Amino acid sequence: MERRVIITKLNKQILTSIMEDGEIVEIHCSDDPVESKGSRHILGNVYIGRVRNIVANIGAAFIEIEPGIECYYALDKNPQPFFTRKIGKKPLCIGDEMLVQISKEAVKTKAPTVTSAVSLTGRYVVLSMGNPKIGVSGKIGREKRAELIALMEPCRNEEYGFVVRTNAKDAPHEEIVCEAERLIKVYRHLRETAGMRTCFSCLYQAPEAYLTDLKNLYQEGLKEYVVEDTALHSQIAEYLGQEQPENLEKLRLYQDRQLPLHKLYSIDTVLGRALREKVWLKTGGYLIIQPTEALTVIDVNSGKSISGRKAQDAYRKINLEAAAEAAKQMRLRNLSGIILIDFINLEEKEAMNELLNTLRKYLIKDPVQATLVDVTKLQLVEVTRKKVRKPLHESVKNNFTNMKESDIIS
């Protein structure tokens, strides 16, 4: 597989588009730090926060990370808070100051979520505070998994453990251990300085989202990074020089004022289609994709009336194509949480099993963990996909609401 990363600016946002074999499979939108105004609370930032309120009936507290910015804090998921200032004898008191990390961005009316389980993410491993275990990505085979657990065992202690990421599968052992040691130094610096800093201090600034995208990218088959903006090119060159020096030679600056990068690779066209509800299939059917507050629904339609003895065969073909397209759209739109897929009903059990196996095959290819859970009594296929960041339609609409349709869709 041949991979390319295309990074450009459009309407005050930075778009990171990932191409595989010439097709855009992911688009990530992040705020341009130069254009954004006011305080920016990036996923992964670590603060000294103050307990503002405790709501026992929902098992949560609200932690203020700066004046007027309150974050949700789940009590049951944070049994071991790291206090920098404790004012009462109860496990948690209003006014307590503690080390917290943003674990979920603010979504619509929901406040950001913070956690005491600070994690530091590298290319190959994640250091997890308060979890003295070694975990390995489920996408790594059993034999290799045992090898990596043995490699990382000497690095952990009672204060922290590690999760080995998929990118470590083919990485040299020396690089993996070296990165783990670097993260340990960052962790120790956080512990040592936390008690000396004032409330609302930001102790750790996570990289900008478009730089984190480069860290999370699968390296297999990576050919080049193409960047249009000169300032962005300099920032990415500096980042790659520090974090991924072996990839620095793959960085290329694109300069053509007559043909912008988003037009050259039809990024605006792909983006426009990814914001629509309807997705057409080659078989003549189509998908309707509707995100809601609680879940996302994907409805498969035949597109035209089909009757007769061959109807089931036609439904089978539409469903198989829809399974591949649904998995593709989940990744492209960055859909997460519970996803219900309403396929066209199939009468034969063998055809249904074939459909489910096809869907599983495509879900496995997703870099983000996606799982086919079950089929309900109403023949709805239930899928879950891990939430890593905001879905595309939310991150785009934040700054694209004033764009003309012609600016988005060519």
Image (cartoon, rainbow, N blue to C red):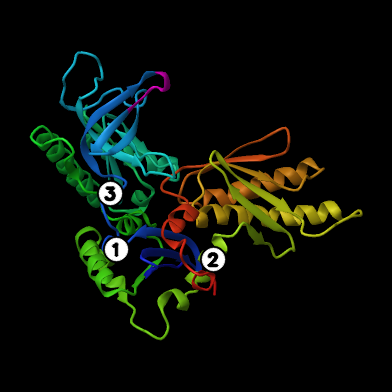
Q: Mark 3 — residue?
A: 122
User: Is residue 410 positioned above or below 132 on the image?
Assistant: below
Q: Where residue 157 appears, x then y in whole percent? A: 21, 30
Q: Residue furthest bottom?
A: 258
Q: Residues within 10 Å of mark 3 (few under 14, many from 20)?
A: many
Which region shows up in magenta? 57-61
User: Is residue 50 positioned above or below 126 on the image?
Assistant: above
Image quarter of residue 82: top left
- Is residue 204 at all visible to an observer of this figure? yes
Front residue of 59 and 371: 59
Q: Residue at x 27, y 28 (%)?
A: 52
Q: Residue at x 42, y 58 (%)?
A: 28
Sequence-first tag of 2 and 3: 3
- The tag on residue 154 is none
Q: Residue at x 30, y 40 (%)?
A: 102
Q: Mark 1 — residue?
A: 35
Q: Secondary structure at mark 2?
A: helix
Image quarter of residue 372: top right
Q: Where residue 398 appears, x then y in whole percent? A: 42, 56
Mark nearer the viewer, 1 or 2: 1
Residue type (three-letter) at the residue carrying disc 3: Gly
Residue type (three-letter) at the residue carrying disc 1: Glu
Q: Secondary structure at mark 1?
A: loop
Sequence-first tag of 1 and 2: 1
